[in-house]
Amino acid sequence: MSKIFESLYRKSVSMSKHSAGPVTDDPASPEAGRDTHIAELEKRLRETEMALRLSRGQLRIALDIGKLGAWERDLETGEVTGSPTFRACLGLPPDVPLTYHDIQQTFHPADVERIEQAVSFALRTKTDFNVEHRVIRPEGRVGHVLVRGNTVYDGDRPTRIFGIVWDTSEREKLKEEANLFQSRQEFLLKLNDQLGDLDDPYTIMETASRNTAQYLKLDMAGYGEVYLDRGVVVVEREWSRGALGNEGNVQQIDQIPQKLKELVLEGRLFTIDDVKTDPLTDDPWSQTFYSSLNVRTVAGVPLVKNGRIAAIFYLQSSQPHQWQSDEIALIADVADRAWIAVEKARTERELRETEERFQIIAESLPALVWILNPNTELTYTNNRWVQYSGLPPEEALGHSWTHSLHPDDWARMQEELKDVVSNHTPYETEARYRSAEGAYRWHLIQGAPVHSVTGKFKGWVGTSVDIHDRKETEKALRASEERLSLAQRAAGIGVFDWDIPSGKMTWTAEQEYLFDLEPGTFKGDFADWTEKILPEDLEPATKVIQEALARHEAESNFSYRVRRPDGTVRIIDTLALFFYDADDNPLRMVGVNLDITRYKQAEQRQQLLIRELHHRVKNTLATVQAIVGSTARTTSSIEEFYQGFVGRIVSLARTHNILTEDYWQKASLEELIQTELGPYEDETRNRITVEGPAIELPSEAAVPIGMAVHELTTNAAKHGALSTFGGQVDVKWTIDKTDGEKPILTFSWTERGGPRVISPTRQGFGSRLLQRVLTTQLGAEVDMDFGETGLRFRMTMSIPGEPPLFNPDA
């Protein structure tokens, strides 16, 4: 543009000089006029140049701000000039002269014809031209520019073209990125729609692999599921463009190139533009590996789920591929989206299968199967509840179950359920449901809390099993067992079961009671049983068992004594059955134990009573003889003798009545003494002294003490103070009471005035009876002194409150 203005200036000066004449100083002269005109023109030219420089400055600032380059092309010489920005847009050196031919070399070959057409049309129509095209910069990078220009004419002949250029590469890049983003989004949306319609995990893998490979124009894509515990990658689904696929192939993890295996195990995405040049695959083994597969480019996206490698999404092609960042982001996105869809499909399939199995199980179970929400409302129940309750299906849910419970059970369960509902705990109880017929039946209710995968409480799932028949059977069985237990306890019978090979022994509660053990304290083995047998009876008892087993006997019966924790000894009778295997090896010994202590006690008492009876007959006859003698000596007539004799005989009968008529009634000690000694009292009533507080003796004390008094009386009548005239007997007793202890009876028998007493050389039945009965049965301390002046007998004992156990050692 500066050249245009310079040309115009030269032309105006030339015209002024050619038209002017000689120069003169006269203002009025023609020369003076020309000088004034020239000065005026020069002034105007300077003002025009100033305005031009200002305009150029403003234009340069505008071009710099808009990042625009200015250029000019001389149509006659082909010379092209331009600003530094213009040269930078085309990638041209800053100081080298340019021709239009040089500019044309920067045009993209595909755009040259379109550019020439635009310029030709502008020249032909004398209009501006505006064209956007591509340029190839020296480094080979393709750029985009927008060129606008205008033509300068000399008459009708175009002489110059000038204009601006704008580098639109960034705009095109943004547009391209926007197009790529839109294309990617459309691809992902379409893929989402496709995956959303699929419910088969393998079809999802195949669809994602095929679409991604086709979109990126690659040869192959697929999913391999990683099993670290087995050390393999299983290719479940793969898509390939006409190549031999690997579907169903099992790849050993150790056979993956080492560097890539490390990336996979670390869960890091990797891409290889060209296998032949990438550092990850530069080792000979990797080159051979990929060459055998005809693979030049690879990308892999490991899928890490819950801290472990679950699968790898891989893409391959037989040609090198320069992986762009947007492509890498795309395959990572596809890998995650598709695998989420795979896991969702698998979860839904498993859920459907689980629900189907649950439905089958729920309907086949002989129980009410139900699900409660956190508000204890039925949200599911099997058809058995509908049938049992008689409710329509639409009414069988909600709180229908609470309305069918027995009122007593529901009142109890409401209290129990408070903690269960508050703490979301399991629950188990037994309750009665009303059936459609109106009858209540017992059910075992068991419920377990259910939580979602996130831990949210969802309610309870459980069953209600009809146990009514079992309850009735158990009730009858308990009643039967109680009756049996009572019968066994009343009869003193215990049951045992000995597993001979293991030595384990099972006792019933009655058996423990028989041995006076706390329930459940028996150790449960043969050795524990033997510990309770008296040592002197252990060997004979075990010998009976061993001999019976050796002879393969079917049963055995034997007795032994045991000492209970309180020190008492009991006699146990055992009746046992033996069981053997096919080879006659002993398996079990099952039997009953019977406490026969009281039977032995009765037997010994019977023997004692027989001996006592014999002794009493003899003593009675002696007593009768003594009564006859004593009565005869104190009477003077037959009538008097008869009356005295009959009275004494009646007193003696009363003594026998007290001892034999009612064995278990209490008796007065004084009455026992008076009954025995009454027949020997004389008319003066000074032969016998009886002194002591009133006391009622329990039968277990009254009988032995009565027998002792009888023996003392008989002995006194036969050999002692009552056998002679003037003999006396003093009987005294005292009762001492102590806090928390049983009363102490101190009893004394003193004779005097009788025949001279000689200490016996042997112990008779009466003496043995006094010593053993009183000492053994009553635990009394007995002292007998056969002094010359008369017998002195002393007994001290605790008065029993309950019947003592009979000691079989007595």
Image (spheres, rainbow, N blue to C red):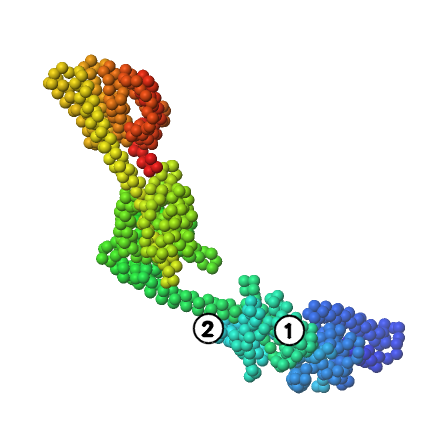
Check disc 1: other Cα within 10 Å, few if <14, some if 14-19, many if 20+. some
The three-letter amino acid code for the residue at tag 2 is Asp
Residue named by callout 2: 200
In the image, 9 versus 28, the foreground residue is: 9
Q: In this view, does 776 lie above or below 359?
A: above
The residue that label 1 is drawn on is 257
Residue 350 visible: yes
Examine the rendered structure and indicate whether residue 520 appears above or below residue 235: above
Name which residue lies at 33% across and 56% down: 553
The picture quadrant where one finds residue 81 is bottom right
**Which residue shows up at 21% across the image and 20% down it?**
680
Q: Position of residue 772 (x, y in %)?
A: 33, 31
> Measured from the top left, where is residue 529 in percent x and y?
39, 46
- Mark 1 or mark 2, which is nearer the start of the sequence? 2
Amino acid type of the residue tagged 1 in the rendering: Pro
Q: Which mark lies nearer to you, 2 or 1?
A: 1
Percent x, y of residue 783:
35, 24
Mark 2, Cα crowd under 10 Å, few <14 / some 14-19 / many 20+, is some
The residue under the point 63% across, 81% down is: 292
Q: Residue at x 37, y 40 (%)?
A: 564
Helix, strand or loop at label 2? It is loop
